Amino acid sequence: MNDQRRRRKPQWYRPLLLTLSLIFTLLLGLEPTGETWAKVSPLSEVIGVENLNSSPYPINQALYVTMRDGVKVAIDIWLPQQLNPGEKIPTLMRMDRYWRSLGIMGYFPEFDLNYPEAKLANNAGYALVLVDARGTGSSFGTQIYPWSPDEIQDYGQIVDWIIAQPWSNGKVGSYGTSYAGNATEFLGRLNHPAVQAIAPRFNDFDPYTQLAFPGGIFNEWFVRQWSENNRRLDANDANFVCLMEQLEGAICDALKVVITGAKPVDADRDGTLQAEAIRDRTANLDVYEAAQTITYRDDRYGTTGVTLPAFSPYRFQEEISRSQIPIFSVASWLDAGTANGALSRFLTYRNPQKVVIGAWNHGGTEDASPYQPADLSPDPPLYEQIEELLEFFDTYLKEDSDRPPITREIRYYTMVEDQWKTTPVWPPQGIVSQSWYFGEGHSLTQRQPQTEAGTDEYPVNFQATTGTHNRWHTKAGGKDVIYTNRATEDKNLLTYTTTPLTEAIEITGHPIITLYASSTVNDSAFYVYLEDINEQGEVLYITEGQLRSLHRQISQTTPPYAVFGPYHSFERQDGQPQEPGEVMELSFDLLPTSVLIQKGHRLRVAIAGHDADTFARYPIQGNANLTLHRNTIYPSHIDLPVMTPK
């Protein structure tokens, strides 16, 4: 393993800590020197301390752009200070619903949270434009639901505004993480001739299956947290930063003195315009309340009159494919379902695409591999990730670029082996399916069952959990993903374990589980965890999959995009209520991974009926007992995608 990944994780790269350092500099009446920036900026290696000391600040403006329906949308513009009259440069654009920037009392550009990002863009020869989505931040209007048609049309109109500026070369690239990543992907569907490249990062290609209802199971914790965060943001609550970072006492008090909420536009010196915009927020959608109306994918989302596919990127695959806009997407094996989305997009869209999948948290700021200590830097480090992003945009937005255009490739990271690999196809060449069966004595074996008898009983433990730092919790704020030794937790689950492996195997792709099970209740959730047990008995999480029994029907319709296992439509027409005692077949894919299982280690499949800190409970109350069948009639098993030896 290289030395870079062995370094302790630098604590200065979290944006809040950058802001705090600057705030305390202000409170103490000190000047933010280059040395201060070097200590707190995650990008100081790219920006350069000398440049910060000697160069004038970049030009920053905050203003409103009026949309076709009269709604005023707040934007920030960052331009290189050295931009000469008549010089024309390309623009990078990021659109978000989570405040384009913080309002800071006694504002100076170098104290703006986006200053390092702007310096990077400006030093690389780009203008940077940041946008508050309508109905959020300092923008006017209402967010009737995420990524509404009006919101996406706004972004196209802002592109029109950009290319009309005297400094624009007429080329725009868009990027963003999470919500901003989806906004970026939706911008691609407009087929705007000025938008030459897009880079959605850690976003949700299918919000139903990859975040809000994986396996048809309601991700209650995340949706409630998202709703609460939105409510505080929309009320312009300056306490929001304290809450997100769990800060209390003097630090939080200092923040509230200096941070005023969302950044207002320059002309709004007394806050009148922002206050008027905030009054519109009372009509913003409560995403948690709306989610209560959903069981099936085709259910109406609250009172919006639309279903979740209405604002899912995959629904617009034809428009985006037709644009042939180059796409650089980034995802993680450990960030909700973002890797699944990136792989589905790769196989569904016809665009030139570069996909990068690492072992990171949401946003790529933390190493999330269960095999590494929790305090390691990401691999590659954040500044290298940003350099690669800028190189991608250089290819398509710079007039004098000599970089070759991207074609179609996936670069992915294999855990334990700590190697990055590249493939033009998915699954990679050399992958074969290897079946492992549940056997007597809670064994996991490649030998098929030999008798017609064989079952295991499992009283569902509704306290079972994957913790509060799992792949789903990182989606709310980008906290680290930490899976500790699951040996104790597995005592609450139904487990099947192999004997020690006689040789190492690489698992890359989507494991597929087939369970034959019955239950004493009429509504059940099934969670399957793939785990690695080392020689010391430590149990390490690899990946997971889940399915609500209501959605177990394998659909005969054509999937709306490329899928990697049995296709479940999650639509009402395929709903299949469960009868107590009925033996059900539940076959579904686990989230993709790439990991080397070492010789002498054991593989484990652990089965649960609930994940208490994350998902809704099925049934809502009462106890449940599951019976797992493992025999010649009902051969429960898992198919692992294994790389053949070279």
Image (cartoon, rainbow, N blue to C red):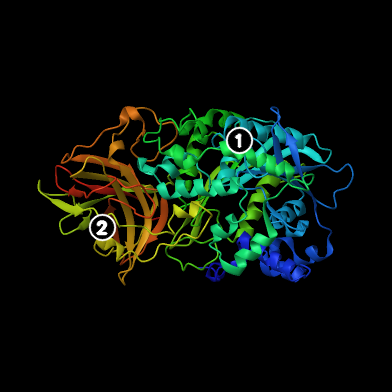
Q: Position of residue 574 (x, y in %)?
A: 31, 30
10 Å crowding of disc 2: few (<14), some (14-19), many (20+): many
Which numbered tag is attached to residue 298? none
User: Which residue in the structure is indicated by mark 2?
Assistant: 493
Residue 241 horizontal/vertical position (percent): 59, 57
Say which of 433 and 307 sits in front: 307
The secondary structure type at the circle numbered 2 is: loop
Task: Give SS at disc 1.
Answer: loop
Question: Which residue bears the numbered disc 1?
Answer: 142
Going from N to C along the chain, the mark reached first, 2 or 1, is 1
Return the residue found at the far right. Answer: 85
Query: How packed is label 1: few (under 14 Cα within 10 Å), some, or many (20 or more)?
Result: many
Name the one closer to the observer, 627 or 98. Answer: 98
Picture residue at 68% right of the left edge, 67% below the top: 21
Foreground residue among 71 and 235: 235
Q: Is residue 556 visible?
A: no
Tell me: 303 left or right of 386: left
* Amino acid type, label 2: Leu
Placement of 467 over or under 206, stated as above or below: below
Q: Residue 168 location, x and y as percent? A: 79, 39
Instruction: Look at the picture and state if 210 lies above or below 311.
Output: below
The residue lying at 55 percent from left, 56 percent from top is 364
Q: Are marks 2 and 1 in contact (CB under 8 Å)?
A: no
Give percent across and percent down for residue 184: 61, 40
Determine which quarter of the picture holds residue 247. bottom right
Side (left or right) of 135 relative to 397: left
Placement of the C terminus among the 4 image quadrants: bottom left
Residue at the image position 79 percent from the left and 63 percent from the top: 51
**Dot 1 amino acid type:** Thr
| Image quadrant in which you'd find residue 57 | bottom right
Q: CA distance from mark 2 to mark 1?
A: 45 Å
